[in-house]
Amino acid sequence: SNSIINELFANQMPSMQSLSDSRVTYLRARVLLDRAIAHPELPNHAETLKRIDGYLVDASEDWNKFLKLPMSEAEKPVVAEAKELLDKFLKEGFMPTLAATKAGNIEEADKINAGAMGKLYEQYSQRIIKLETMQFALAEAQLKASEQAFKVFMWVDIIGVLAGLIAVAVSAYFLLAAISHPLQFVLTQFEAIGNGDLSTQIKAKSNDEMGQLLSGLEN
């Protein structure tokens, strides 16, 4: 159970967070690029282009952070496909559009943006969504496994406690029987002797304290 929880918090959740952050940040960069292409005349145009560069750096860092974290065998081929589509989106779509925008060639930038880049981003985004779905399913399965392991541990604990209580009860019963029965017998004999009845034969059946007491009565 502890290993499952550790896997969730140390690997699975950071992996999901990094992947999501990367996708969202690339989307933000694309939205800003759309704005820069649509309104190159705005006074903050240069600042918008700098923000796009910053988003690209952040998205790349999140993506690389995701790649360094452990992943399941089922995830690896999907990750490879997503990486290939991301590289293609950046190389053939985003970066040429950004370069044309920075050069002031808005017509060329708009042409790429309206043509190849939309399709390339859609392919990349769909693959990331598939990967995120797989991660959520894996995290859910791990959480259920953790809950099941906890339930098993809880029932083992309860059974252990009940078994211990039963053992104590049984031990107490036999201990009381071992003490009370001979004691009751001795008390009965003392009462008979006090009444002058010496006809009952007394035999000690053990060598413990109670047996020694009965041996004294035999004499």
Image (cartoon, rainbow, N blue to C red):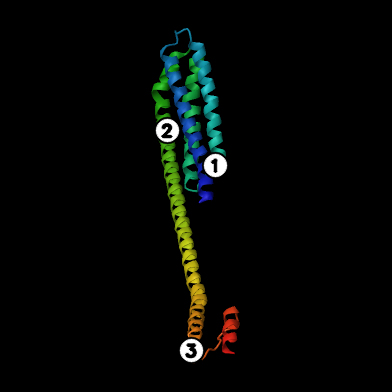
Out of 122 and 169, give the one closest to the viewer: 169
Would you call the spot at circle 1 few (<14 residues within 10 Å), some (14-19), or many (20 or more)? few
Would you call the spot at circle 2 few (<14 residues within 10 Å), some (14-19), or many (20 or more)? some
Out of 210 and 42, give the one closest to the viewer: 210
**Could you tell me which residue is drawn at 45 percent across and 23 percent down?**
28
Q: Position of residue 200 (x, y in %)?
A: 49, 90
User: Label 2, label 1: how many angstroms apart (C-alpha)?
Assistant: 25 Å
Q: Which residue is mark 2?
A: 125
Out of 91 and 217, give the one closest to the viewer: 217
User: Label 3, label 1: how many angstroms apart (C-alpha)?
Assistant: 83 Å
Amino acid type shown at disc 3: Asp
Disc on the earlier residue, 3 or 1:
1
Q: Position of residue 56 (x, y in %)?
A: 52, 25
Q: Which residue is mark 3?
A: 197
Q: Is residue 49 above or below residue 170?
A: above
Secondary structure, mark 1, is helix
Amino acid type shown at disc 1: Ala
Q: Which one is in front in this view, the residue at disc 3 or the one at disc 1?
A: 3
Amino acid type shown at disc 2: Ser
Q: On the rendered image, what quadrant is the C terminus found in? A: bottom right
Disc on the earlier residue, 2 or 1:
1
Secondary structure, mark 3, is loop
Q: Which residue is mark 1?
A: 10
